[in-house]
Image (cartoon, rainbow, N blue to C red):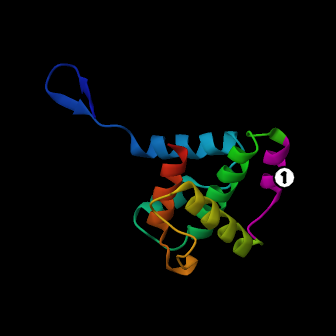
Amino acid sequence: MAAREGGAGRERRPNLKASIHFLCRSLASVGVGNLLPEEVRQAKFNVQGPRIQLWKALHDLLVLSQNGFCARVSKVLKAQGTDQAQAIVEYAAVQLDVLGCPFLSMFDQPSQIGSRRLLLALAWLMA
């Protein structure tokens, strides 16, 4: 819903760029790291490039939520890179399936899941 501006019938649209930057900063503030605004923008268009970063963000958010957003867990996750990509993807896929995420299942082939579906899963998880 757009907010009215100045009574002239013009509507002020939300600043999408600022919203995406806020999302990435908010995720980083709770320990979900390394998701860049440009990767979110690319995911919106289903570009394959940011897939592992989205899987990592899903993984980190799941682990943090299951551990009460503990600062110690956050430090461990920040130190963990994407070198264990297979384990990150498998964990996130199983946990999202258990939670009933409508956008992916542990039976989906990770290579077949586009970045737009991962972005939708991230939005679903944060909601």
| Figure disc tally | 1
Residue 100 placement (x, y as % from top left)? 51, 57
The residue closer to the viewer here, 15 or 106, is: 106
| Residue located farthest toward the left when viewing the structure as drawn | 9
Considering depth in this image, is 30 or 25 the residue closer to the camera?
A: 30
Is 124 on the left-hand or right-hand side of 13?
right
Q: Quadrant of the N terminus?
A: top left
**Residue in the image at 40% along x and 65% along y:** 45
Tell me the crowding category of disc 1: few under 14, some 14 to 19, or many 20 or more residues within 10 angstroms, Cα based: few
Res 120 → quadrant = bottom left
Residue 47 sits above or below residue 6 on the image:
below
| Farthest top residue in view | 7
Magenta highlight range: 72-82
Residue at image position (45%, 62%) is 103
Q: Give the side of residue 16 with respect to residue 100, left or right.
A: left
Query: Of residues 102 and 16, which is closer to you in this image?
Result: 102
Quarter of the view holding residue 59:
bottom right
Looking at the picture, how far across and down is residue 51, in whole percent?
56, 69
Q: State the residue in front, 75 or 25.
A: 75
Residue 111: % across, % down? 55, 80
Residue 107 in magenta stretch: no
Residue at position x 73%, y 40% from top? Answer: 69
For the point 68% across and 44% down, the residue is 65
**Residue 71 vertical placement versus 114 (above, below):** above
Q: Amino acid at mark 1?
A: Val
Q: Secondary structure at mark 1?
A: helix
Q: Which residue is mark 1?
A: 76
